[in-house]
Amino acid sequence: MDHTNHVRLAASELTPTILEGATVYGADDHKVGKVDHVHGSGTDSKAVIDVGGFLGIGAKPVAVPVSDLDFMRDEDGDVHAVTTWTKEQLKAMPEHHY
């Protein structure tokens, strides 16, 4: 996916309402998961990403700092994130328990 025309979100937009449901793309630009929910707001918050699984079944939730994700909007206004983490690295993280 070419992200050059996508607009990065401002810090004030890093809220659960905007970020939840965003697709997360890894270092190789492949989909690594989806933001399930967010703890807090702004750059100090944590995003819980469902990694792996199929259609949400069998996915492993992991928590990462929102600052490790580059959130942006595409031409259609859809929010997504890019990270340097790979799917394998995220799967190796401890499971987030609610």
Image (spheres, rainbow, N blue to C red):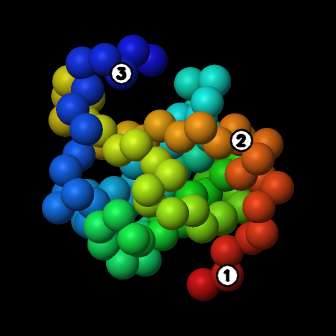
Quadrant in the picture for residue 19: bottom left
Residue sitting at the far bottom = 98
Residue type at mark 1 is His
| Crowd class of label 2 (few under 14; some 14 to 19; many from 20; radius 10 Å) | some
Q: In this rendering, is residue 30 above or below 48? A: above
Image quarter in which the N terminus is found:
top left
Residue 87, which numbered label? 2
- Residue marked by disc 1: 97
Q: Residue 96: give x, y in percent of width and height.
A: 67, 74
Q: Position of residue 13 (x, y in %)?
A: 20, 58
Can you identify the residue that label 3 sits on? 3
Q: Secondary structure beneath disc 2?
A: helix
Which disc, if any, is residue 29? none
Identify whether 43 is placed above or below 26.
below
Q: Is residue 23 visible?
A: no
What residue is at 47 percent from the left and 37 percent from the top? 82
Q: Position of residue 8 (x, y in %)?
A: 25, 38
Q: Is residue 73 left or right of residue 91?
A: left
The residue located at (27%, 60%) in the rendering is 14
Of callouts 1 and 2, which one flags the residue occurring earlier in the amino acid sequence?
2
Which dot, 3 or 1, sits closer to the camera?
Answer: 3
